[in-house]
Image (spheres, rainbow, N blue to C red):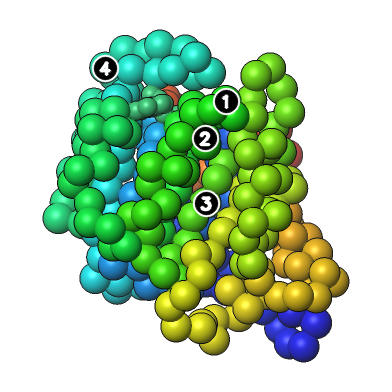
Amino acid sequence: MSNGIYFPPSLQRFEPKRMVFSTWVDHLPFAYDLVAAIHPKLIVELGVYNGLSFFTFCQSMIEHNIDGVAYGVDCWEGDEHTDAYDDSIYNDVAEHAREHYRGNTYLLRMFFNEALQHFNAESLDLLHIDGLHTYDAVKEDFTNWYPKVKPGGIVLFHDVMAKIKDFGAWKYFEELEQQHEDVFKFNHGFGLGVIRKAGGEPSDEPLLKMMFSKDETTKQQLRQFYVHAGLFLESRRQATFWRQARKGGRKGGQGKEKPPESSEAPPAE
Ligand SMILES: C[S@@+](CC[C@H](N)C(=O)[O-])C[C@H]1O[C@@H](n2cnc3c(N)ncnc32)[C@H](O)[C@@H]1O
């Protein structure tokens, strides 16, 4: 970034089609840009819950004409950290998938270990690990699924800065940082870790070059960029909401129909 202007697709045209409560919200612009940069043929997400991260990957695939497929794996029962939840979450996710991503997206309602058999070794371009966040669970998910990732493929880990309760993604990711050449970590939100598996073709994409640069200043600038990109997206979303509310187009309800959480009503005209 120190050598030029970075103006990725998330700043140019990203309007999330899926907006539900999740701590993943801080990383949406990055997720959108990452998919645009790596053009994945095959994405697997472990831990979909209400689909915020998953549908951002899917939306980017469609909006960048990427001829790929995304699989979302979840038991849709919840775990020790999300607590148990009912079928309404799965039903809502399935409806959103049918409405927007029929043919590009498959939901595998099963345990992660059961889904393993459906994927070939070294076939995934992008793997997102976001299941249970204890040290042991994250380690197990990575150990089981890493062989499924292509050389040059990308692995994302959510919550690598969450040092609460028995969360241990941060600790496991710190170990991986010592073992892998191409690693990057966003510190904002609850943190997002990125690893590029060794091998594959080197990429000319600015995002990948900056993430895996050896220059710490470049990496720090990229971190700051995506902090601002997240804030920018949220401001734009609030502005859109209130514009539509003024026109009487919004009824309230779940997800993006709701007033943005941190917003205040705009001044009366
Ligand atoms: C943190 S949530 C996922 C959040 C989601 N990526 C988002 O954007 O908000 C974790 C999900 O992983 C699921 N999960 C945890 N361990 C699992 C396992 N071993 N097999 C299947 N699903 C699991 C839970 O049911 C839960 O819905």
Circle nearer the N terminus (2, 4): 4
Q: At 59% across and 29% down in the image, what residue appears?
A: 135
Disc 1: which residue:
134
From the viewer's perspective, is residue 169 above or below residue 186? above
Is 134 or 242 nearer to us in this picture? 134
The verdict on label 4 being within 8 Å of ligand 1 is no
Q: Quadrant of ligand 1?
A: top left
Amino acid at the residue labelled 2: Val
Q: Which residue is mark 2?
A: 138
Residue behind mark 4:
87
**Residue count near mark 4 (Cα–Cα under 10 Å), binned few <14, some 14–19, many ≥20:** few
Q: Nearer the viewer, mark 4 or mark 3?
A: 3
Q: Residue at x 38, y 47 (%)?
A: 145
Q: Position of residue 29 (x, y in %)?
A: 56, 58
- Residue 178 visible, this angle: yes
Secondary structure found at label 2: helix
Q: Amino acid at mark 3?
A: Leu
Residue nearer the viewer, 91 or 129:
129
Residues at badges 2 and 4 in contact (C-beta under 8 Å)?
Answer: no
Determine the CA span between mark 4 and mark 3.
Answer: 27 Å
